[in-house]
Amino acid sequence: MQKKLFLAGGILFLAFAVIITAGCVGSDSTGGPTVEVVEIAAGQQVSSLGMGQIDGMINWQPNIAAATESGIGKVISYSQDLPRSDGKTWKEHTCCVFGANEKGIENNDLAAVLTGLMLLGNEYITEHPKESAVFVSDWLYGNTDPTFGDKTVSGTSIIEASLPTIRFSTDITDRWLESNYEFVETQRSLGTIVNYLKDTSREETEELIYDFDSYYTAVEAIENGVLPQPVSKDIAIGYLLSDHDSPLFILLKNWEYFKNNYNAYLKPVAEKAGPVEKAELYVNGQKICNVSIVAGSGGPNLMTMLQTNAIQYAVAGTPPFLSSIDTQPGLKILAPIMTEGSALVVTADAPANNWAEFVAWAKESSAAGKNLIIAIPQVKSIQDVQLKDALESAGITYKIKSA
């Protein structure tokens, strides 16, 4: 007998990024210490670190585990422990969410089913961590083990090291809501939110960025033991090649588990190693629609696809959603997926093992005329915002390397 849906309390992106040619080095024009940052694709940062092209990186999982498991790097600080300019830390900070555009929200029953499936994917990871690591490794690495320079590492070992550092939770908690607003305020102070969200109150901000109707519909359906029956045209779900998106990967790689245990599941059209591109959504034994699973090159890319309706749903970071909504309201966050899951990493032989030692190293290097070079995945990403704020708290200037 099938259970009813219930709530629980790659290949890495390998697009090569050219390291921007160095600009001026040493202290900035004010005479203070400086760290230079460069945008490098998330999946390329470990190789760049191993080749000595950068001194460190702030990145998301599983790239952190790839750096440590390969022996290329070591963790200075996980993201939740980085200092903020207001004296706090980023404990339980927001990260990836499940969101949609206006077309995706139109059919609340469909949005509720997809949101409910994300909850189930999270629950599976919590209850089956070792099995989850195998499925997620399959999605990200396929049948091969990743290589970083001359270092080859077991994909499964990377994911087994990575998943425990991520908080997979779909609970809409006060802390999660507060964390999202903290990112809005931080981005305002950094000058990266300048339009619709620039001066909004917390209540006005939440009205613009959230739509929890599908979440509460899913919760009500769970409590009543009945799942809504959606009818829809074909849909598309966007994601990034990171184990932050593991609930989606689990749903598709282990689809028979969900078919056998629940009344909703996503079935791949073809089963193979690596990512799934085409699937079918089933509810109560009935095929509802075809589903395209679309990999994005980054959060901003997913937001563009949502805005142009190339996809209707996406698993992506909170900051890209905030930046997109600030520019063009309409996209909505439906539910959290996970929190934390990032870190600042430096080369394994760096003369620093924690944040205080990193600050001292950065200041000494700048005074000697050689600024540290730290890679970020994207400007305005969670990692970029956190690094910039942490450096500000230490009195260190953050400068993008000039071309």
Image: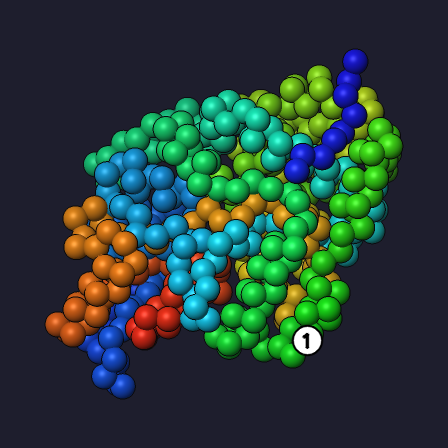
- Kind of residue at disc 1: Thr
Image quadrant containing the N terminus: top right
Looking at the image, residue 285 lies above or below residue 94: above
Badge 1: few (under 14), some or many (20 or more) residues near its Cα, within 10 Å?
some
Q: Residue at position x 53%, y 70% from top?
A: 187
| Horizontal side of residue 290 vs 361, given as left or right | right
The image position of residue 188, as x and y in percent, is 55, 75
Instruction: Tell me: 332 left or right of 82.
Output: right
Q: Is residue 159 above or below residue 375?
A: above
Q: Position of residue 381 (x, y in %)?
A: 48, 60
Q: For this view, does 229 lie left or right of residue 330?
A: right
Colour approach in the figure = rainbow
Q: Quadrant of residue 161?
A: top left
Question: What residue did someone put label 1 on?
Answer: 200
Q: Name the residue rendered at 30%, 52% in the picture.
A: 76
- Which residue is at 47% across, 24% downward? 130
- Furthest-left residue in this view: 368
Q: Secondary structure at mark 1?
A: loop
> From the image, which quarter does the C terminus lie in?
bottom left
